[in-house]
Structures are given as C-alpha cells and as structure tokens.
C-alpha cells in the first residue's frame, strides 16, 4: 500500500449536477462515499484510504451533492432528499461508465450506497457500510454536536470530538479545513436544507425491508465507541442482510477511515478480494 499516492481532482456532470471527484490508482473500481456532517468532502474523509488502496484498485471518491466542490442547487426543485442523493450517486457511476463497482459508504454515504445497491444492483458488485445510517439512532450528545453545529471553529472541534474515539488526535489543520468548507458560499445553505429535510422526515431511515432487499455481498463495519450510530445497529444490519459479514473496531468512533485508515483499508481490501469475481 502506497502512502505517496496523490489523487487527481476532476469534474463530471452526473444527473445534471456538476460533480467533483478524486481519482487514483488502477485495477477493479471502488467508489468511496463520504458522510453528511458539516464540512465533509472526499479529500477530508478519504485521503488516507485512497493512499492505502490505490496500488490495487481504481478509486473514485465524489463530493456528494451539496458538499465540497460539487454543485449545491439552491432552487426548490431540488430538495436534498435521500432519494435525490441516491439518484445522484447512481448517475455518477453511470457517468463514469465504471460499474459494477465495490461501493463503500460512511454514515449518510452508507445509506446512499445502500440505496443504490438496492435500486441499481447492476452498478454494485459489493457493498461496504461503515457507521451507516438507515436504522433509528438515539439522540446522543454526539448527535447533538452535529445537529447543533453553529458554523464556528469551536463548533467544528466539537463535531470532530463527537465523531471520533478516545484515542484520536486530529491532524494539524483538520478542524480549520472542515470549518472553511462548511462556511463556503452555498455550503451553509445546502447543509441547512439537508438537515431540515432530515428533521422533517424523521432522520435518515431506510426501512428494514429495503435493507433486507440488498443482494450483493456486504461488509458492515462499526466503531465500538461510535456515539452517533451505536454498534447495535451494525448487528441489526447483519441480521437483515442475507450475504453480510461484520467487523467491529475497538476504541474507534464514527470515522474508521480517518481514525484507522490503514486498518480500514486492509479490511476493505480483504473483503473485496474474497467476494469479487476474479
């Protein structure tokens, strides 16, 4: 695994939306989908994972609609609903012409990846859900830190602490980077519309029947200290999904790909090697 990999930043039009993404490596295609916290983007969430996987796989990591450098539609014709996110991700894979792919999603990105696997099985050969949304979660102090984000650096510091385990030390500049992204023109409005939609629709829920409908091999990864999506949800995903495996990482919060990038990448690599057709 080559820690020196520097991904290329590119744009593609997916579902009519200008979509920024990182691309690196060569080999079977893997798409990495970040979560929905303020200041999230492909670079901040996936740089470590890309460096560890790009010597074996062709990696694509988009900024989800409303985040990073991707388009942030301001009009009322775009609601920032979960169905729209899933349609955008499917359109992204279609636009690149790389499916079927191994699809890896964290948190809201996990639910988005799951939706694509359910509705467009032709695009997904295997699925990795990490701290995935989709099932009910309790209103924890960690979740409050995300919902009550005040767009200050101290508020972003609280989010980073809420999303990580007890051993995590943020890299220099991490909080400042995520805060700067969260207050860019259009980003603040998009984030408000994303969270408003979630509040109006009871959160990020898939329904157990939809989860159970996924038929591709699925790996469920959970941080044992995740205060946002409890580890019990990972076990429920495993109960519902027919062809599923599970990994629980001790002393890890909601961000295994940031807290333990080399370990997480090795887990993904081992899974994909086992279940993908040769």
Image (cartoon, grey):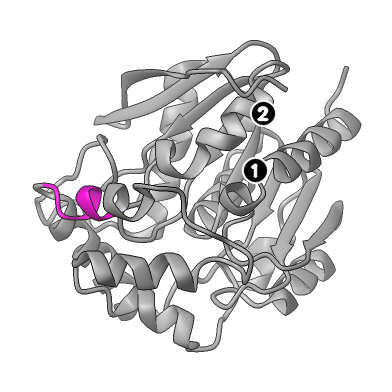
Left or right: residue 139 versus residue 221 is: left
Report the magenta stretch's main SS.
helix
Quarter of the image for the C terminus: give it.
Answer: top right
Taking the image as shown, residue 119 lies to the left or right of residue 13, namely right
Q: Secondary structure at mark 1?
A: helix
- Res 14 → quadrant: top left
Q: CA distance from mark 2 to mark 1?
A: 8 Å
Residue drawn at x 55%, y 18% as measured from the top left: 5
Residue 145 % position (x, y): 37, 78
Question: How many badges with numbers are in the image?
Answer: 2
Judging depth in this view, the residue of 264 and 189 nearest the camera is 264
80 in relation to 5, above or below: below
Residue 268 in the image: state x and y as whole percent.
75, 39
> Which residue appears at 47% of the width and 44% of the height?
45
Query: Marks 2 and 1: CB-CB under 8 Å?
Result: yes
Query: Residue at position x 90%, y 33% from top?
Result: 274
Give the residue number, with chain letter if any, for mark 2: 52
Q: Is 193 located above or below residue 264 in the figure?
A: below
Q: Is residue 236 above or below residue 88?
A: below
Q: Which label belongs to residue 126?
A: none
Q: Quadrant of the N terminus?
A: top right
Q: Find residue 248 and report its image quarter.
A: bottom right
- Magenta segment, which residues? 179-184
- Residue at 21% x, 49% y: name it: 180
Disc 2 secondary structure class = helix
Q: Give the camera-side residue of 140 and 217.
A: 140
Left or right of residue 108: residue 59: right
Examine the rendered structure and indicate whether residue 62 appears above or below residue 256. Answer: above
Q: Residues within 10 Å of mark 1 (few under 14, many from 20)?
A: many
Which residue, given by chain and number where applicable, does mark 1 sit on? 261
């Amino acid at each position: 695994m080559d820690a020196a990999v520097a991904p290329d930043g590119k744009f593609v039009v997916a579902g009519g939306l200008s979509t920024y993404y990182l691309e690196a490596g060569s080999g079977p295609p893997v798409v990495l989908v970040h979560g929905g916290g303020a200041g999230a983007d492909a670079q901040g969430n996936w740089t470590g994972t890309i460096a560890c996987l790009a010597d074996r796989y062709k990696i694509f990591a988009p900024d989800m609609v409303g985040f990073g450098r991707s388009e942030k539609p301001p009009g009322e014709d775009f609601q920032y609903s979960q169905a729209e996110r899933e349609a955008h991700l499917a359109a992204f894979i279609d636009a690149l012409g790389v499916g079927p792919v191994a699809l890896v999603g964290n948190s809201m990105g996990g639910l988005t990846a799951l939706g694509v696997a359910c509705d467009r099985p032709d695009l997904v050969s295997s699925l990795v859900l990490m701290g995935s949304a989709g099932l009910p979660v309790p209103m924890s102090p960690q979740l409050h830190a995300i919902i009550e984000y005040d767009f200050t650096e101290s508020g972003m510091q609280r989010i980073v602490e809420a999303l990580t385990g007890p051993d995590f030390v943020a890299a220099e500049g991490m909080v400042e980077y995520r805060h700067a992204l969260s207050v860019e023109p259009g980003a603040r409005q998009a984030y408000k519309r994303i969270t408003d939609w979630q509040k109006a629709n009871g959160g990020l829920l898939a329904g157990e029947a939809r989860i159970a409908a996924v038929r591709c091999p699925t790996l469920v990864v959970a941080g044992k200290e995740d205060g946002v999506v409890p580890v019990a949800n990972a076990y429920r995903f495993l109960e519902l999904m027919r062809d599923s495996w599970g990994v629980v990482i001790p002393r890890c919060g909601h961000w295994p790909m940031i807290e333990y990038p080399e370990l997480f990448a090795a887990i993904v690599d081992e899974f994909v090697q086992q279940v993908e057709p040769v």
